[in-house]
Amino acid sequence: MSKKISIPAAIALIALCCILTFQITFLTVSRKYEKETDRQELSASVYEKLNSVDEIYRSKFIGEIDEEQLEDYLIRGYVVGAGDKYASYMTADDYAQVLMDYSGSLVGIGVHVVFNGDYGAIEVISVVKDSPAEVAGMLPGDLIVSVEGESVSDLGYYPAIAKVKGEEGTVVRLTVLRGENASETMNFSIVRAVIEDPSVTFRMYDSKIGIVEISQFISETGKEVKDAVQQLQNQGAEKLVFDLRYNPGGLLSAITETLDFLLPEGPIVRIYDRDNNENVYYSDASEVDLPICILVNGSTASAAELFTSALRDYNKATVIGTTTYGKGTVQYLTVFSDGSALYYSGALYSPPFSDNFEGVGIVPDVVVEPDEVMQSKNFYKLTDEEDNQLQAAIKHLNSN
């Protein structure tokens, strides 16, 4: 399939990441509800050409111009032209829907997603366990290219997401590309439902090893991780496995709170703006002093990659699995006076001591590819014994 560029390039992993339902990946809100700021002047030739096009359409076009749509697409075109692959412009209605997603029950199909600029598609990073999407057979790596017969590239990222969401009990029709080079086309009809998706789950593996699965970093994740670790220690855990496979990232505040609990005194993350000004977040002296393994894969992204690299930077964890996604940029949010909003890439972030991993990812200390059993089964249906990556982590902890 030939590559396409979407009209609104959106957040990819800091996706804005969504859960079709909707969650954010490594997002910092820079200015809420502010008025438009001064902009740099475009070249006179650009304005002259744009004015000429406008005059032609207003004097000779046989159709009727939708002024609101025209303005929206002019802005979307600017965002695409700027080359910011993680950016997204939202209309007032789009942004209002985002706010609603944080204020009440989440209705959708149950997938965590990011924008895939190569295909102009919504890429599925992970599927919520027992969700309508899992029941229907959707898989991580699926590319949603159309919703209700309209292409994602024509709709734009957030409008497409809005169409996937809807009323509980109603059906949404999706066209999906799957497989190597997205060569297989599949159609799904999925019934929307209220999605229950806790960010942290935990359990004891045996009498000494506790497993903490973090699906994303949202506002409650730091507290949930702390509670999980403390409960596991109360049950006798002396070693920990943090499973971040298919974790697309999350909020900056959530990842810093989580790492502050785990790390000793020192830097957590270093953020650099376009002028290379540095802003550093620090951890206090309290820490969790237990042997740790971290499980990652190609869908471990953004804040989840920071979690992984930060613990490794402090020599507190061994990383096992496959190379991560590679997203090391921060997106900021500006809300304009008319209620529309813009996410844009405004900074790079780096782990405490190692380098930024944008476009590169994190190579595990111990590379373990999924074996045939893992590949033949739904990831979320695997038993601990069938999960060869988890077993590699258990073996490593037991041998050290």
Image: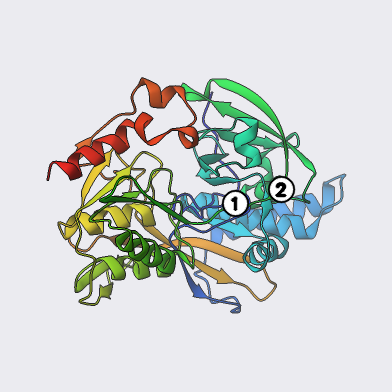
Residue type highlighted by circle 1: Gly
Number of numbered tags placed on the structure image = 2
Q: Mark 1 or mark 2: name the one nearer the start of the chain.
A: 1
For residue 193, the mark is: 2
Asked which secondary structure carries label 2, the reply is strand
- Report whether residue 323 is seen: yes
Residue 137 image position (x, y, % from top left): 60, 30
Q: Is residue 75 left or right of residue 92?
A: left
Kindly identify the residue that appears in the image at 66 percent across and 76 percent down. Answer: 337
Q: Is residue 133 left or right of residue 349?
A: right
Asked which secondary structure carries label 1, the reply is helix
Residue 145 image position (x, y, % from top left): 62, 34
Residue 191 image position (x, y, % from top left): 74, 40
The Cα–Cα distance between marks 1 and 2, rounded to whole angstroms, is 34 Å
For residue 77, the mark is: 1
- How is the structure coloured here? rainbow
Residue 200 or residue 81, whichever sits in front: 200
Quadrant in the picture for residue 272: bottom left
- Report whether residue 270 is seen: no
Residue type highlighted by circle 2: Ala
For residue 221, the mark is: none
Kindly identify the residue that appears in the image at 13 percent across and 41 percent down. Answer: 399
